[in-house]
C-alpha cells in the first residue's frame, strides 16, 4: 500500500489548497481500505479564482501562433510519455481498469496531444466568391474564450485531453473539473501541462464535487463554452444551465450499444468482439457493447462459444498482469450493476453466467463482480434499455436480419453500433439504417480513433462531435469577413 497523497487545485500556474481546507477521499476500488488521495473539496471561491486566472490569460494565449501553442502540446505529450508507467499505475489503482489498459490510455492521451499540436498549423477558414467583383470574402475562426471541461472517471486521461487539447490549440483557456473519483490521476496529468511550461492561467484545474464545482461551472458567466462527458441526467442539467445564459455547450453521454451477429458471421471473431467490447474496462465505457443481438439460426451455437470464453476471464486486481477484468470503479457503480442484475432476473431474463461478487477472500475488499451473461432478454426489459455501465451482456434473439436491425434501433440511445457479417447487403443495410453516431463493421462497438469525429445520435449526445477536425466546430466561432478596397 502506498501513502495517500494530497491533491490541491491548480490555479494560475500554482498548486493551491482549497480555502476551506476540506478534503474528499479517493480510494482504490481493488481495496477499499487503501486511500489513494485526500483531494480538495473546493467551492465557488476557488472556481471564481480559476475563471479569473483563465480570463486574464486568454488575451496573451490567443495572440500566440498555432505553432507556438502546438509546441507546448508536444512538450506535454513527451512528458506524459515519459510517465506512462507512473500514470498508468495511478489510474489502475484509482479506478480499477487493468494496468495494461491504463498505460494504453495514457499513451493515447499523448497521441491526442500530438494530433492537436498539428492542428495548430492547419487552415481555419475558406475563401468564398463574393457577389461583389471587387470584394474579398472569407471565413476565419476565433476562440470562444474560457472553456469549462467536466470529465468523468472512466477515461481519466484520454477524455479530458481530447477536450483540453483542441480547446487550447484553437486559442481558448481552460478550467477543468475532473471527477473526484479520479482526481489523483487528473493531478498527474495536470502536472505534465505545468511542467511543459504553459503560460500562467492558460490551464487550470479545480477539484470538488460535481454538485458544487461542476454545477458552478455550468452557471458561471465567465465560462463561454462547456464540454461535458458523463451521465444523461447530469449532462442535460449542464446543457440547460449553459443554454439559459447563452453559453455554448457540448454533451457526450450514455450508450446502450448493440452488436448484431448475423447468421453468416465468423462466430469466433464475433465472440472475441463481444467480450472485448462489452467487458474490457469492466464494461464502463459509453461505447461498451451491452446488447448482443443474434440471429436465430446461430443463436445456440454462438451462446455456447461465448459462455466458454467468458468463463476463462480472470477477475482481480488490475495490477496483476494475469487479471483480465478489474473491479467496478466505485461502490455506487457496483451497487448499480448488482441492482440491474436483480432487475434482469425479476423481469424474466435468464442469468446464464456470473453477475455475482467473487467468493475469493483476496477480493473481499474490492468492488468486484464476475462478468454476467443474460439469456432470453427482451427489448422491453430494463437491462435492454438502460445504461448499466458494468460487465453485463444481454443476449437478444432476432428472427432474421431485418428484425435484428429493428431491435438494435429500439433504444433511446444512439452512440455506437456494430455488426458481424460477411454479406455486403447486410453491411450496406446496417450502415444506412442504424441510428448511431459510430458504425463499426466486423469490429467491436468500442474503439474510438482520435483523428475521426466521435459523438452520438438520439439521447447519447447534444448532436455535436468531438475529436479529429470536428473539434474545431465546438471550440471556435466562425467569422465571415467581407473586405472592399
Ligand atoms: N458517457 C460516459 O462516458 C459516462 C457515463 N456515465 C454514466 O453515468 C452514470 C453515473 O456515473 P457518475 O460518475 O455519477 O456520472 P456523472 O454524470 O455524475 O459525472 C460526470 C462528471 O460530472 C460531474 N457532475 C456531477 N454532478 C454534476 C452537476 N450537477 N453539475 C455538473 N457536473 C456534475 C461529476 O463530478 P463528481 O463525480 O466529481 O461529483 C463528474 O465530473 C454511470 O453509471 C454511467 O451510466 C458515467 C461516466 C462516464
Ligand atoms: O471507446 C472509447 O475509446 C471511448 C469511450 C468513451 O468515450 C467513454 O466511455 O466515455
Image (cartoon, grey):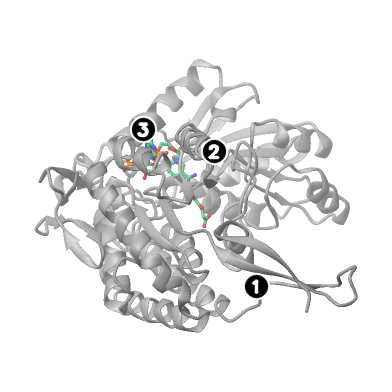
Say few, some or many: other residues with alpha carbon within 10 Å of mark 2 (under 14 / 14 to 19 / 20 or more). Answer: some
From the top left corner, tell me how far across and down residue 296 is, in percent.
75, 35
* Residue 143 location (% of width, % of height): 53, 64
Q: Residue at x 90, y 68 (%)?
A: 131
Disc 1 residue crowd, few under 14, some 14–19, many 20+, Cα 10 Å? some
- State the separation of the CA atoms marked 3 and 1: 53 Å
- Quarter of the image holding residue 93? bottom left
Q: Of discs 2 and 3, which sits in the foreground?
A: 2
**Which residue is rendered at x = 52% and y = 69% of the image?**
170
477 to 375, vertically: above or below: below
Q: Residue at x 80, y 33 (%)?
A: 403
Specify whether tag 1 is near ligand 2 (CB below 8 Å): no
Identify which residue, 83 or 172, lies in the foreground.
Answer: 172
The quadrant in which the C terminus is found is bottom right
- The secondary structure type at the circle numbered 3 is loop
Secondary element at image label 2: helix
In space, the residues marked 1 and 2 are separated at their CA atoms by 26 Å
Task: Locate residue 7 relative to residue 297 in the image: left or right.
Answer: left
List the residue tagged with mark 3. Answer: 356
Which numbered disc, 3 or 1, marks the residue that appears first in the sequence? 1
Pointer 2 residue: 243
Mark 3 packing: few (<14 Cα in 10 Å), some, or many (20+)? some
**Secondary structure of residue under mark 1:** loop
Please identify the quarter of the rendering in which residue 203 is found.
Answer: bottom left
User: Quick check: marks 1 and 2 in contact, CB under 8 Å?
Assistant: no
Give the x, y percent position of residue 401. 81, 39
Where is residue 1? Give x, y as percent.
11, 57
- Dot 1 or dot 2: first in sequence order is 1
Q: Is residue 253 above or below residue 277?
A: above
The CA span between labels 2 and 3 is 43 Å
Return the residue at label 1.
Answer: 124
CB-based contact (under 8 Å), mark 3 and mark 1: no
Amino acid at each position: 500500500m502506498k501513502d495517500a497523497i494530497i491533491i490541491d487545485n491548480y490555479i494560475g500556474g500554482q498548486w493551491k489548497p482549497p480555502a476551506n481546507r476540506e478534503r474528499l477521499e479517493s480510494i482504490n476500488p481493488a481495496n477499499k481500505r487503501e486511500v489513494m488521495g485526500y483531494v480538495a473539496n473546493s467551492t465557488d471561491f476557488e472556481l471564481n479564482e480559476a475563471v479569473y486566472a483563465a480570463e486574464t490569460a486568454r488575451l496573451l494565449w490567443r495572440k500566440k501562433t498555432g505553432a507556438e501553442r502546438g509546441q507546448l502540446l508536444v512538450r506535454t505529450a513527451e512528458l506524459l510519455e515519459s510517465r506512462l508507467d507512473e500514470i498508468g499505475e495511478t489510474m489502475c489503482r484509482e479506478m480499477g481498469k487493468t494496468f495494461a489498459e491504463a498505460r494504453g490510455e495514457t499513451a493515447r492521451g499523448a497521441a491526442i496531444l500530438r494530433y492537436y499540436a498539428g492542428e495548430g498549423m492547419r487552415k481555419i477558414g475558406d475563401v468564398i466568391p463574393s457577389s461583389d467583383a471587387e470584394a474579398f470574402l472569407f471565413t476565419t475562426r476565433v476562440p470562444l474564450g474560457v472553456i469549462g471541461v467536466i470529465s468523468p472517471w472512466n477515461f481519466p486521461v484520454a477524455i479530458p485531453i481530447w477536450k483540453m487539447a483542441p480547446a487550447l490549440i484553437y486559442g481558448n483557456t481552460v478550467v477543468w473539473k475532473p471527477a473526484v473519483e479520479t482526481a489523483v490521476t487528473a493531478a498527474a496529468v495536470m502536472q505534465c501541462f505545468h511542467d511543459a511550461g504553459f503560460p500562467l492561467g492558460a490551464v487550470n484545474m479545480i477539484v470538488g464535487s460535481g454538485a458544487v464545482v461542476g454545477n458552478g461551472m455550468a452557471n458561471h458567466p465567465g465560462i463561454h463554452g462547456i464540454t461535458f462527458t458523463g451521465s444523461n441526467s447530469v449532462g442535460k442539467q449542464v446543457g440547460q444551465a449553459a443554454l439559459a445564459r447563452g453559453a455554448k455547450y457540448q454533451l457526450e453521454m450514455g450508450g446502450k450499444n448493440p452488436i448484431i451477429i448475423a447468421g453468416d458471421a465468423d462466430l469466433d471473431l464475433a465472440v472475441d468482439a463481444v467480450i472485448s467490447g462489452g467487458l474490457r474496462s469492466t464494461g464502463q465505457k459509453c461505447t461498451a457493447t451491452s446488447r448482443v443481438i443474434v440471429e436465430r439460426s446461430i443463436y445456440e451455437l454462438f451462446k455456447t462459444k461465448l459462455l466458454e470464453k467468458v468463463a476463462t476471464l480472470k477477475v482481480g486486481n488490475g495490477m496483476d498482469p494475469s487479471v483480465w477484468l478489474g473491479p467496478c470503479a466505485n461502490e455506487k457503480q457496483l451497487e448499480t450493476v448488482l441492482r440491474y442484475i436483480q432487475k434482469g432476473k425479476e423481469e424474466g431474463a435468464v442469468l446464464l453466467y456470473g453477475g455475482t461478487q467473487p467468493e475469493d477472500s483476496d477480493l473481499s475488499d474490492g468492488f468486484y463482480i464476475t462478468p454476467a451473461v443474460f439469456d432470453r432478454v427482451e427489448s422491453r426489459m430494463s437491462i435492454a434499455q438502460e445504461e448499466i455501465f458494468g460487465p453485463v451482456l444481454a443476449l437478444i434473439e432476432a428472427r432474421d436480419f431485418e428484425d435484428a436491425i429493428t431491435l438494435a434501433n429500439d433504444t433511446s440511445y444512439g452512440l455506437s453500433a456494430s455488426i458481424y457479417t460477411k454479406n455486403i447487403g447486410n453491411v450496406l443495410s446496417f450502415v444506412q439504417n442504424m441510428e448511431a453516431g459510430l458504425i463499426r463493421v466486423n469490429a467491436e462497438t468500442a474503439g474510438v480513433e482520435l483523428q475521426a469525429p466521435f459523438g452520438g445520435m438520439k439521447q447519447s449526445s447534444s448532436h455535436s462531435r468531438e475529436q479529429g477536425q470536428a473539434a474545431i466546430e465546438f471550440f471556435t466561432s466562425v467569422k465571415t469577413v467581407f473586405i472592399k478596397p
